[in-house]
Amino acid sequence: MNYHKFRRIIFTTLGFFLLAAEAKAQCLRGLQFAYCPAADTLYVLTETSLGAWNVSERKVKWQIKLPKGVVISNLVATADRVAFAAEQYPSTIHAYDALTGKASWQVERNRIETMGSQGPYIFAETDELEGLIAIDCRTGKIAWTHEGKKRGFANIEASSDGILLTSLFAIDAYSGRVLKRWPKDWDVSVAMFAGDLRIIGTEHAWSQHVTLAVYSGPAFKLLWARSDPKNPIVAGIAAEGDKMLVATYEEEHMFRPGRAALEMMSARTGKTIWTKEITSDYMLLPTPVTLTQGTAIFFMDDTPDSSVMQAFDANTGIQKWIVHTDRRLTDGVCSGQSCYFGAVSNTILEVDAQSGAVSWLSLPKQ
């Protein structure tokens, strides 16, 4: 047997065992924060520090000071490491022990853009065409690399079940083998998982091009696809069970005042359950929806210094609560009843999905 083929089989087989062992440790990433439910820990990255919050005890576990002038990317976390990329040309990925905050390793590339994590690996998009690297989170060693020749950059969108979804293709997280390429005319804006489904949203699509598509299973069988020329930007997708909440925008209204169309639908069939239209007087956001425990949440910035969050019953669309914040939100993730939203003030808003009760978390200033 060819050595490289044998090596790939070994990595893939080991990957399934590692995935089963670490599935419960899957962490959720925001832009400047990451939440690891299994560790009851929220990692927060600011311009000056990186810290870990024990969520249930409401206290800082550790906090380290960063060098002045460091330009940072999004934060990712695994059960063992928390990491971010700093600077550009070259970029350096800095990894720290998730329990102690002690510096662990560094990896340098010409440029690092988006990052992600899955099981024992941290992934990073590089400046090579279709460039991706998988890094063993414990050692900092490169597990595999992927490069292409003709296409663009593989923005990392989501990871689950041993699969990494990017803006160009789905790739095996443990071997680096491309599993499915999206059509070349798709400008993918968001990709995510819903059970055994893989959901792809696009932006700037012409009227005859697909704006939303759903694949099933390891064979990536296309279940359904549709085009929406009135709302060609798929800004956000959130899923729970068979329900899928999709936020779409009019072409001219990305990152500015405009109208968002919300649609709750069956992920497997594409059948609409309910729809709503919401208008923003200040700015719509690129990742504006979350869905957890039967509650659908949409948030937007209503002034330069504030945001508004609206929660709806996932079955009926009836509004459950509305919250106005005195700080502008950027993105959010949910796990169980708790949701966490990043803010431009380097603070994190914790929201109870059922009641709308809120509290702010922040690291001490250094």
Image (cartoon, rainbow, N blue to C red):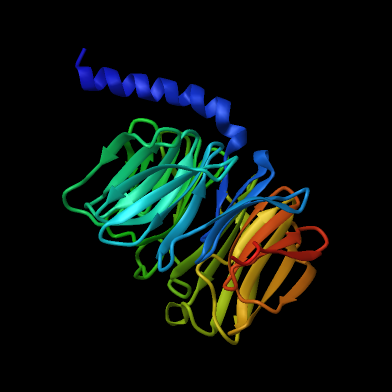
Q: Camera-side residue: 157 or 232?
A: 157
Residue at (22%, 44%) from the top-left corner? 147
From the top left corner, tell me how far across and down residue 224 is, in percent: 47, 50
Q: Quadrant of the N terminus?
A: top left
Residue at (46%, 58%) from the top-left corner? 74
**Residue 205 can be seen, yes or no:** yes
From the top left corner, tell me how far across and down residue 162 is, in percent: 46, 34
Q: How many marks?
A: 0
Q: Camera-side residue: 324 or 35?
A: 35
Answer with the quarter of the image where residue 277 lies.
bottom right
**Residue 215 can be seen, yes or no:** no
Q: Camera-side residue: 146 or 232?
A: 146
Residue at (36%, 48%) from the top-left corner? 124
Residue at (58%, 85%) from the top-left corner? 304
Vertical position of residue 198 compared to residue 256: above or below: above
Answer with the quarter of the image where residue 314 lies.
bottom right
Q: Quadrant of the C terminus?
A: bottom right
From the top left corner, tell me how far across and down residue 77 is, in percent: 52, 45
Q: Say whether residue 80 is left or right of residue 294.
A: left
Q: Say whether residue 102 is left or right of residue 296.
A: left
From the top left corner, tell me how far across and down residue 322 is, in percent: 77, 73
Q: Say whether residue 177 is left or right of residue 323.
A: left
Vertical position of residue 87 compared to residue 195: above or below: below
Quick one: which residue is furthest to the top in this view? 1
Q: Camera-side residue: 184 or 227?
A: 184
Q: Say whether residue 232 is left or right of residue 241.
A: left
